[in-house]
Image (cartoon, helix red, strand yellow):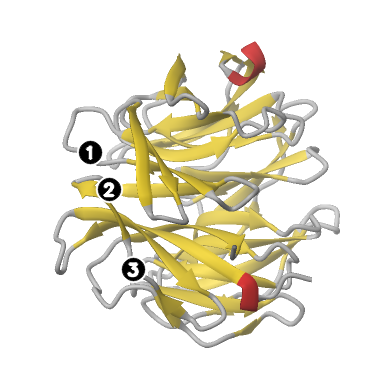
Amino acid sequence: MTTSASLLAYVTNAQDNGASAGVGSVIPVDLATGKALAPIPMGEGSGTNCIIVTSDGKTAFVSNEFSNASDGTVSKIDLASGTVLWSVTVGAEPVDIEFVPNTNETWAWVANYKGGAVTTVNLADGKVGTTISVPGSGANTVAFTPDGKTCYVADWGTDSAAGNIVTPIQVTGDGASGTVQPSITVGLNPNWVAITRDGATAYVANKGSRSVTPIDVATNTAGTPIELTGQPIQIEISPDGKLAYIAVAGTDVAGNAIDAVVPLDLTSRPATAGPAINVVAGTQPHWIAFTPDGARAYIVGNGNGTLTPITVADNTLGELIIVSTDRAADILGIAIVAAS
């Protein structure tokens, strides 16, 4: 069993508003001590958003959403030295980046929110493969079926016109390209897609509708939405595939502020949402990562620069971990790896 005594969390900070104003970074956190380590700066105006880490825990790739150029970048980081090895230009405002399964972590796909497209990147040589235009106006996140054959792209939309579709893309070219399939109507502002370990169901977090929509992957049809009390930001499935945690923030239907994590039982048919796990007010839960053994989950607090540990067995909260003392920092993504 891997415990927090041997784990590091890497958390993205889109913008440090304190001593290094405007500089995006990746912040390592020692989960054994609960202490944040020296940030890895990503550059002025980088807007570092999502992070993925190779299975050996040595290398990270991040999306830099708000670069100083018209298009954002993806950067490769050597985690041992905290060195940025290269950056490659992708599309406008890249938000999410994910490995393509079954490519030995050679290919990743990037959702370019403002660009309305997905960019494929060869992580071995740092070169862009293909740009795939998708329907809608705000490609926000990507998620792959475990076999790597299909990618689902959530269209968040814009502030003035909410998106309401998820678009499947058939992966081709050994991960370098893809063919767009008919879109699937879901709820408003779909912000995240999580696919079950068996590849049977994709769950879509609809922030604007306060719901989660299940999609039958075999038929690409949407099922009955699962209603929530608050606005879902992200959904993460546990390593054993039996449970999902949903980060809920914003307001409930009555307009009251809510900061919580909602467990979703994936063993029931249909999946059933349990009682909300309330976290510290103002936390604004944003991103979730489970430890490799599934015993704990860590919740990124975008509103207060923290991580909240949750013991999965009984849904109890652990001691709050301070990632950044700059309360104006924009803490977003997280990846957890075994410390080397």
Q: Residue furthest bottom?
A: 319
Q: Is residue 219 above or below residue 197?
A: above
Q: Which residue is mark 1?
A: 67
Q: Could you classify mark 1 by the number of other residues whose Cα lies within 10 Å: few (under 14), some (14-19), or many (20 or more)? A: many
Camera-near label (1 vs 3) is 3
Separation of residues labelled 2 and 3 (CA atoms): 18 Å
Q: Is residue 106 above or below residue 276?
A: above
**Mark 1 / mark 3, whichever is N-terminal:** 3
Which residue does the image show at 49% across and 81% down from the upper left?
34
Looking at the picture, which amino acid does disc 1 mark? Ser
Q: Which residue is mark 3?
A: 38
Q: Is residue 175 above or below residue 23?
A: above
User: Measured from the top left, where is residue 170 in percent x and y?
Assistant: 65, 18
Separation of residues labelled 1 and 2 (CA atoms): 6 Å
User: For the residue labelled by badge 1, is the local secondary structure a helix, a strand or a loop?
Assistant: loop
Q: Which residue is mark 2?
A: 47
User: Measured from the top left, where is residue 252 in percent x and y?
Assistant: 46, 68
Viewer-proximal residue, 151 or 274?
Answer: 151
Separation of residues labelled 1 and 3 (CA atoms): 22 Å
**Mark 2 / mark 3, whichever is N-terminal:** 3
Q: Is residue 280 above or below residue 329?
A: below
Camera-near label (2 vs 3) is 3
Q: Residue furthest front?
A: 81
Badges 1 and 2: C-beta atoms under 8 Å apart?
yes
Q: Say if residue 230 shows up in the picture.
A: no
Viewer-proximal residue, 290 or 286?
Answer: 290
Looking at the picture, which amino acid does disc 2 mark? Gly
